Each structure stands twice: as C-alpha cells, then as structure tokens.
Amino acid sequence: MFGLLKNKLTSFIKGLTSREEGKTQAQALQEKEKPPEPVQESKIAEAAPPEPFKPSEEKIEEKAVPAERKPEAKPAEKKAQDVPVQKKPGEMPPGFPAQQSAQSQKKSILESVAGIFSHKKQAEIQAADISRLERKATDERKEMAPKIGIGTTLKSIFSSEITIGESEVSDLLEELELSLLESDVAYDVALEVVQQLRKELVGLKVPKGEVEKRTRGKIASILESVMYSERKFSLVERVKGMQKPAKILFVGPNGAGKTTTMAKVARLLLDNGLTVVFSASDTFRAAAIEQTEVHAARLGVKAIKSKYGADPASVAFDAINYATSHSIDVVLIDSAGRQDTNANLLLELKKIVRISKPDLKIYIGESIGGNAVIEQIKGFNEAIGIDGAILTKIDCDAKGGTAISVAKATGAPVLFLGVGQDYADLEPFDPHKIAEEIMA
C-alpha cells in the first residue's frame, strides 16, 4: 500500500538531497543548461578574427596540401547559398543545423498543444498559459532537481551547513504538489502539505549529509498532522461508555464492503466482551439479507431481518427492541448502498436515522476510490452527519492518497483500515504509523 505516494515523496527528497553535492552539482547543472556544442562552435566561427591574423598557418596549408584546394569548393558553397531556404517562425538561420532541428521539434510540440485551443479566438489564449505550455513541452529534464545558485554554492563550500533557499525549492514544491494529486491526495490536503513544507524548509540550516534525514522527518511530521482529527476516538471505549444498547449505523456507496466491514466490527466488539445483534436493513440489494445471516451464523450472533422491499427503518427498530429485551450491548445496522447524489435514497437514510437514532454513524468507503471517496463522505456528512470512517481494500490501493485526505478534507476521523477479507483484517488507523510507513 501507499506505493505511488512513497515513490513521489522519495523523488522529492532525492531532488532536494542532491543540493548538498555543492559546486560539482552546480557545475553539472550549468553544463546541462548550456546551448548545444554545434551552436557554440558556429558562434565562435562567426566571431573569430579574419584569416590575415594567421598568415603563417595559411601559407603552410597552401604548401603542404595544394591538391585539396579545389576550385569547385567555392561554387558549391555559392550554390548552397543561392538556394532559398524556407524558414519557419522561431527557427534559427541555416548556419545552425543542430539547433534548427531541435527548435523545429519543440515548435511542432507547441503547435500540437495549441491545436487543442483552435476553436477559441487567439485573443482568448493568455500569454501566461502559452509560456507554461512551452516550458512543459520543451523541458527535457523531468526529474526533480533543485536549481542551485552560484552564491549558495560558494557559501556551502566554506560552511559545514546548508541553508535551503526559496528559489531552490520552489520548482520542487510545485512538482510535489502535482505528484500528491496524482497519488489521489485531495487538492486542499496537497496544497496544505506543500505550504507547510515550504515554511519548514525555506531558511532551514541543515548539516551537510543530513538533508535527506531532516527532509524525511519534516514530511512525516506534516503527513501525520494532516491525518490527525480532533474528533478521533476509540470505537471500543466509546461503545463501552454508551447507554445500552449502543446503536451503530453503517452507510456508504454500493460495493464498498459495508456488510463485511460490519461483521469485522462485530468480531472486534465480541473480542472485547460486548454482545452484538445485526439489523439486516439492506432490503434492496439481492442476497444482502442472506449475506448478513451468513456472517451472523459464523460469528454466533442474532440477525434481525424482514423481507426484501420492507422498510429499512422498521427493521432497525425491531433490532433495537430485540437488543433491549435481551440485554444486548450493541446493535449494528446495515443499510443499502447509495450514492451521495441520490436525493431520494438520502431521504430514506434520514428516515432510518430519525427512527433508530444511532449513537454513531460510520461511513464505509473504498480507499481505491480516490477523490470520489472524499466527495461521497462530504455528501453523507452534510445529509446525516458522519462520526467516523472506515476505508476498505487498502491492501489493493497502490496510491494511498485517499487515506491521508479524509480527516483533513471532512473533519471525520478514519477509525480503521480494511486490509483483507478475514474478520481480523481490520487495522486501527494510526497517523504516526502510516506516516512512518510512507517515509520508510
């Protein structure tokens, strides 16, 4: 899990760490930024003094190699010069063959990108956008590496510390923000991570050789802070402190694993000495009631059910009455999968809440859902109020950004992560442990 997010952050750290290579790294970057050699040689040839300044060499050449000075050379040059060259806008003159091909290639890329906007008027295309597209299209160095100033380089030579400057990390932070978004980190969360990291890094004095260690520590601390929620609580401890029977409602979209996760929570409560009853209130999905009964039989608990198409709220009401009369500690209420954009289904969910009055409302969502999960939980939170979230299928999530986004984007704490299909595969959400795992 968190594979892509790990790679993106590691790439950022390596780019920042390369700064401590000092003068050698700066010279290497400057060499990369120099124009191609053919351009330099042609410019030198044009600026070179006329041949009279080297009379001795010219005489030696005439005596030593008289046969190579053929009269056909000059006419050939004249013919080449007489042929008109059709030059495209932005291309270099014919004296620059290597640069001409490179510029032509870059120009063709820009023209292809500009073609996307061909349906718009030229006046609508902002100069800033064209400049940005040109920079992205012609940038040959995609790796994240800081731009080291000569002043900083000279200072680092005579000092045992490195001071990280704004100009040296601005490009890196921009790339990091894009990388976080690619890893399914919510936009608000990615922006906050980058802003906090900018505050932590700019002006930071780091001993040589410890740039990577310090940077990793800063990022881990920031990730932990954005995953932390002030509303975080221990489910078992909260339930034990509630008036019996405690009522927990599970909500979420189709296919997220609500019924299976409800069974995992039941196993957790049973292991902590609490008694449980199921409310099979998903009366819409085919085989949902049978699935609840199978889990109940495996766990040795009672499942209160009705027929398909029955009122889900009435099933929950019956389960609560059963728990009250049989001194059962907790009622776990299943519900039909629904999207946060379906107004009718949300009204039905509000009815369940109004009748059963659950003590906790827990959202179940797939971690592989990306930013859609954030929007879904926001919708459920606005409709009925969410007390916590459980993210399933985290073992299948190669990106990992959703897990660190929920608390900051919604305010609801992530309680558990589903890491498998067994009842024991419910791992408590620990921001410190996850931050350390990502930065390992």
Image: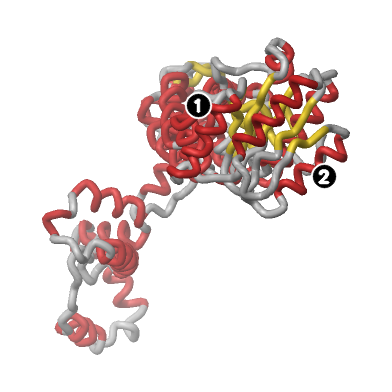
Residue in the foreground of this view, choosing between 307 and 124: 307
Q: What kind of residue is marked 2?
A: Val
403 sits to left or right of 319: left
Please provide percent x and percent y for residue 398: 63, 46
The residue identified by callout 2 is: 294
Q: Residue at x 41, y 46 (%)?
A: 31
Quarter of the rendering containing residue 438: top right
Vertical placement of residue 382 versus 397, above or below: above
Q: Residue at x 56, y 37 (%)?
A: 402
408 sits to left or right of 242: left
The residue identified by callout 1 is: 385
Residue in the foreground of this view, choosing between 63 and 249: 249
Quarter of the rendering containing residue 199: top left
Q: Residue at x 79, y 24 (%)?
A: 269
Q: What kind of residue is marked 1?
A: Gly
Give the crowd class for mark 1: few <14, some 14-19, many >=20 residues within 10 Å. Answer: some
